[in-house]
Structure formats: structure tokens, C-alpha cells
Amino acid sequence: MNPTSTLICIPDISGFTEFMGETDFELSSKVIPSLLNNIIYSNTIGLKVSEIEGDAILFYKKDELPTLTALVEQCCYFYTEFYKQLAVLRKRHSAMDDAVHIPKILGLKIILHYGKEVGLTKVGNSIKLFGEDLIVAHRLLKNDIPLEEYLLLSGNLTDYYKENDLAQKFEWGNLMEHSTDYPQLGKLTYHYIGFKPLVQK
């Protein structure tokens, strides 16, 4: 397929590696799939699943994109539903000693990126994404943001929406501008905001 403009959304479970190391396989094999399914079922704006990447889900949407307000609300919903599911899982598996690690270790971060040249191709029954913008989205997961749980909006995404007062979309905290240098990609500028206040009210 020819490259097309595409929204990329990657909800990523933070603490995944530590959780897998701290808990036995019986518990982790129940908890992680349940959380990933919860994220998929919390999708209310028609994002499509390209693939599940261990501790993350690669969503995409091409053609007409949601408004920035709708997109931010969706990400907040992903996060709050994720935390509700953590509480459900801790209670459900309370008889297991390692259940205490469920809310202490696991969290969620979400990367939003807009790519002007994202290729889509069918492999089996799945639609796979490819192209430099997919690389950018995944690189943005590796950053020096001093938080474990946050929403990150790439420069490409904020440029696409051209909001005059971007910070007004985020009533629960301070939206910060930041940049990170990446090999081959150079400096990428983005905005981020911590998610934690959404579950501390």
C-alpha cells in the first residue's frame, strides 16, 4: 500500500519487566493479558489494532482523525480503566502472595504520534505498519521523562492539530515541553503530562 497519513497510539504497560521478574508465571500470565484486553476494550474512538507487542498495543487510525479533545479524553479513559482493572485483578488474585505487586509495580504510559508517511500492508489476517514514523513512535517510548506514567504527544501530532492554547486540553496537570536526542533521528521535541493525578482525586 502507498504511504498514508496515520495516527499512531501506543499504550505501554510500565513496570512490565520488573513485574515479570517479581511474580511467578501463573500470576503474570493472568494479569498481563487481562490488562491488555482491558486497554483494547476501552477503545471508544475507532482506533484499529495493528499488533500487540508484549507489554504494549500498537493502535492506528488513518484518514479522518478524532479531535484533539476526543483523543486526550480517550487516553484518559485508557488510563482510568487500566487502574480500575488493576484493583479488580488484585482482589481477584488476593490469595496469591505476589498479588501485592499488581498496583505497586504496574502503570501505563501512552505515546501519540502523527505520521505523514506510514505504510500499511497485510500480513496474514493483520495489518502491519511500517515506515520511519513508526520508528519515531517507538523511539519516543525511550526517553528521559522523569515520570513512570504519562501521556506523550509528539511534535508532529501537535503540529497537525495546530491548537492555539494546547495546555487548556489538560485540566488535571501541567503540560511540559521537552526534547530528546536520538541516534539517526536527531532531536525530537514533544509535550508530556503525568497521568497520576487522574487516579489520585
Image (spheres, helix red, strand yellow):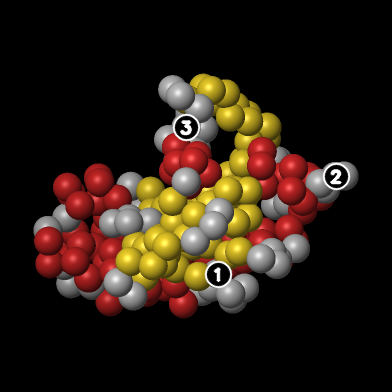
Residue 46 makes an appearance in the image:
yes
In the rendered image, which residue does mark 3 sit on?
Answer: 143
Q: How many numbered callouts?
A: 3
Q: Which mark is residue 65?
A: none
What residue do we see at 66% from left, 38% from top? 155
Q: Amino acid at mark 3?
A: Asn
Q: Is residue 102 left or right of residue 71?
A: left
Is residue 58 shown above or below 92? above
What residue do we see at 66% from left, 65% from top? 63
- Most distant residue in the right direction: 164
Residue 104 makes an appearance in the image:
no
> Quick check: marks 1 and 3 in contact, CB under 8 Å?
no
Quadrant of residue 128 in the image?
A: bottom left
Mark 2 / mark 1, whichever is N-terminal: 1
In the rendered image, which residue does mark 2 sit on?
Answer: 165
Quadrant of residue 45 in the image?
A: bottom right
Q: Residues within 10 Å of mark 3 (few under 14, many from 20)?
A: few
Q: Amino acid at mark 2?
A: Asp
Q: Is residue 151 left or right of residue 31?
A: right
Q: Which mark is residue 47?
A: 1
- Counting from the top left corner in percent of width and height, residue 67 is at 75, 63
